[in-house]
Amino acid sequence: MSALSYQPILPRPAPRHASGALAWLRSNLFSDVKTGLSTIILGGLLLWFIPPFLNWSLFNAVWTPDVQACRAVQESAACWGVIAEKYRLIIFGRYPFDQQWRPLIATVLMMLMLVASCIRVFWKPWLAGSWIAVLTVFFILMYGNSLGLAKVPTDSWGGLPLTILLATLSIVMAFPIALLVALGRRADLPAIRVFCSLYVELIRGVPLISVLFMASFMFPLFMPPGLTIDVLIRVLVGITLFNAAYLAEVVRGGLQAVPKGQIEAAATLGLSYWQIQRKIVLPQALAMVVPSIVNSIIATFKDTSLVSIVSLYELTGALDMAINADANWKPFKLQGYMFIAIIYFIFCFSMSRYSQWVERQVNKSKLR
Amino acid sequence: MTEPIIKFEKLNKWYGNNFHVLRDIDLDVAPGERIVICGPSGSGKSTLIRCINRLEEHQQGKLFVDGVEMTDDIRAIDEVRKKVGMVFQQFNLFPHLTVLENLTLSPMWVGKMPKKQAEEKAMQQLQRVRIAEQADKYPLQLSGGQQQRVAIARALCLTPKIMLFDEPTSALDPEMIKEVLDVMVELANQGITMLCVTHEMGFAKAVADRVIFMDEGQIVEQNNPHDFFNHPQNERSKDFLSKILGH
Amino acid sequence: MSLKSAPKKKRWSWRSQAFRGLIYQIVAIGVIVLGVWFLASNTLTNMRVRGIQSGFDFLNQPAGFSIGESLFPFDSAESYWRAFWVGLANTLRVAVVGIILATLLGTVIGIGRFSRNALVRGLCSTYVECFRNIPVLLQLLMWYLLLTEMLPSIQNAWQAGPFFLSKGGFNYPIPIWQAGHAWALAGLVIGIALAWLYHGWARRQFEATGIIKSMFWVPLGVVLASALLAWLLGGAPSALDSPVKGEFSVENGGALTPEFLAMLLGLTIYTASFISEVVRSGIASVSRGQTEAAAALGLDPGLEIRLIVLPQALRVIIPPLTNQYLNLTKNSSLAVAIGYPDLISIANTAMNQTGRAVECIAIVMAVYLTISLLTSLLMNSYNKRVAIQER
């Protein structure tokens, strides 16, 4: 057999029945009898439930803060008027009504900083400095007592600004602790290793609520007599210690994944222990565990809802406070819950999408 | 002229809508024939042999394996898979089973063979590839070359009529390639039909009845090894040979 | 020139790594000890100033409060110690049932994400994204609201035969214990033993002849038939204590309170979304080459999953799965927000009544730590046993 008969064949598009919308439908929804049946049953169930739900939640719902209108449609439609009426209480908690422009600006600033920190363009040295500046502005705006702003004590802070503040500060403070503890668990010095391991295992073995109770009830006892600590600070310390333990485990996973040869090579170049960790090990370790770190951040964000059990009125607590006392709007509490559920969902879903994006970027650097 | 044991008739395959990976393949493989398929990466060589045991599906054209037409029919596919053994580039041994269990898995569960008989057969195959003493080890305790030989023995336990090799030595360290190639040469001399995708041209020269060169989804040139290596006809074949035989 | 022995090292030099390490550790221990001493002395001073007593003796005093639901009888004259046990039993009750249900639901959804049907895949993904991104406390509160506001009142309870569902909870009939039930239980045990023997026999048959025997339906049938037979022999007792709608509540029968139901629903649905992710990544961790090799050997999809995919996937699934179980158990502590009397609720009440914050929190943390440690130990030993042998 010779090759003189070789004629190059140009690529052709796939035959029509193997591609296109109809083909996708066929292979994904009706590929065989069982699949087709389940599609029909599930599709039928969805068609049964979704239109009435849309009617209830969107088309027939009441959007204006009108109690009468809401009561009139109570059985058959949602009353989003409760949100229209109470949204400022829900989002800002007990913050004085006329001063609510302050937490608004503070929260917007904080969120802008958070978003900026996620974009590669902004990863410059002055980012840390601007963080400190924004945090200072945040506290001045919220607390006041200077620059002509009225003082607002921390137990009046609430709602979304409190949620974001707790989540952001506790992560920012937990991170250095987590790094040290993770390095400590892998250190050659037994005393430090034991102490760090005990800390991590102790915290990871107990629920957050018990740590919050400890912060709330026991921290005042730990302080010298006469010194009182703000409840916000106590809770913040509790959440920070809690997060630091979980983050330490995540970082430790990353440290374990860095090949030993890296440390050996760095040591032969004459670098000290701290230089090696700072310049060689930690950058690689952290890059590997970014998705887990973002998961930790998402979990922290959701965990802030627990502080409502120790009387700090973040988003969930603010909702209870706003609606429980008002007999007019109490029947519509479910809509209130759905509202803050959507807020949480938006935050957490965006963060998890961001983490997937970061993972793709990291993997891109590994493809040839 | 005996019936070909594998017959491709104008076979075409696409990945998705636009990637035309196999173009109008016409190929007849006689029983007992030993074929080496070579070509640049992305040319569709692995895809071609994976169509034979339906690890890949073709969209156009026909494929006959030992008289059975390869379609969506599950029974046809099962029948064919019992007669075709395959050796993968990444070995794909089952790490949670011992070497012996890897080999007796198919005869016991698919071939409905009693355990003792399956184990005897497995030991025979292990001796054939000269690795019988590792029967009770786990795959990850063996070296790459040993693992690939176990993989060959595992495929042989089916008593296949056709053996497919998908770049069997590409994932091995150089010093282990020889032990695997030796086993393959022995196998080739025992009359089994072999299709082997490989870059090991020494193996092709020693054993192949036919060398097929593929590029961009097409069979560009096929010839006996001597003529192919010494008098390549096509520009692309010459180019490819110069690259791989050069060093 | 030859070296007779290694040159002597200066032991106490600052340049020696071992010496430096020792100093660092001594400093660290010193700092920790100082810190603990500082906190402890402050605590003792504060407690003296505020007149708070310390010690665990309060556990023997009568509790002075009653508990909404408990597995064993409890009234306000019982001791705090017993109250804590009631709380622990409640915690374990909701945790164990929640773990079982969440595993089933999570596994189904995790496998559903690999379905050929795009609708099934989409629904499963939506479920996971929806329930993963909302805090569990909020979900618990919403379920509690639905169960206590949206369900009909007891007078208008939904009824399906002897089952009632209302704001008061879920009521179901329980069989009245008679001798025949002991027979049925004995029959069940015998049935399980018989099924075990069958299992061994079927395996030997398979190895001897290659014929695959049914390993699931036949043993199941044997167990059920044996229990049924024994029940019949024992007189087929079928008397049920059925719930009956009374004036203010549903009487008789067994009851699940709305608090328990809200905890169960919330925890199950939340944890199932995480378990489904664990199952999904476990199945995805088995490389495609394994399934291709199995297919090339002629194994059908059922055997492929049973013999190749599942054993390897389980090794990857079990550690994070036990982590989720621990999370569910820890999340059950949120019961304090909806009034389910779990361990932390009871500790909270005790703390408020006696002022012994340190002791109560210590008890609670010790209990949870024990549960976590036991689970970790079990999981570590399981991991060692099934680890894939490498060089």
Image (spheres, grey):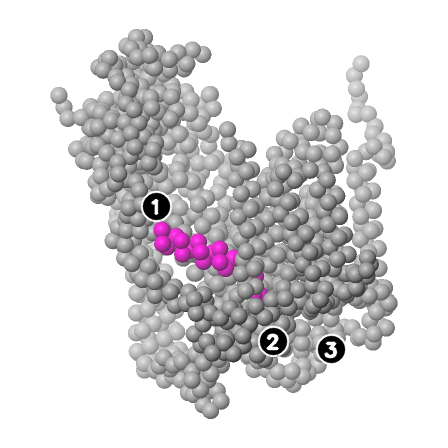
Give the class, few, some or many, for how many residues have Cα within 10 Å of label 2's Cα (few <14, many ≥20): some
Marks 2,3: beta carbons within 8 A: no
Marks 1,2: beta carbons within 8 A: no
Classify residue A6 as left or right of residue C200: left
Q: Nearer the viewer, residue B54 or B86?
A: B54
Residue drawn at (78%, 73%) of the image: C54
Evaluate whether residue A281 shows in this view.
yes
Q: Nearer the viewer, residue A302 or A218?
A: A302
Q: Nearer the viewer, residue C287 or C6?
A: C287
Q: Which residue is mark 2?
A: A324
Marks 1,3: beta carbons within 8 A: no
Chain of the residue where label 2 is placed in the rendered structure: A
Above or below, B104 relative to C185: above
Residue C360 covered by magenta stretch: no
Give the class, few, some or many, for how many residues have Cα within 10 Å of label 3's Cα (few <14, many ≥20): some
Chain of the residue where label 3 is placed in the rendered structure: C
* Coordinates of residue B141 in the picture (x, y in percent): 48, 35
Q: CA distance from mark 2 to mark 3?
A: 29 Å
The disc label shown at residue C304, or none: 1
Location of residue B127 (image quadrant): top left
Q: Could you tell me which secondary element the residue under label 2 belongs to? A: helix
Q: Which residue is mark 3?
A: C354
Range drawn in magenta: C118-143
Location of residue B158 (image quadrant): top left
Q: Could you tell me which secondary element the residue under label 3 belongs to? A: helix
Evaluate whether residue C212 shows in this view.
no
Which amino acid lies under the numbered mark 1 shown in the image of this protein?
A: Glu
Classify residue C377 as left or right of residue C252: right
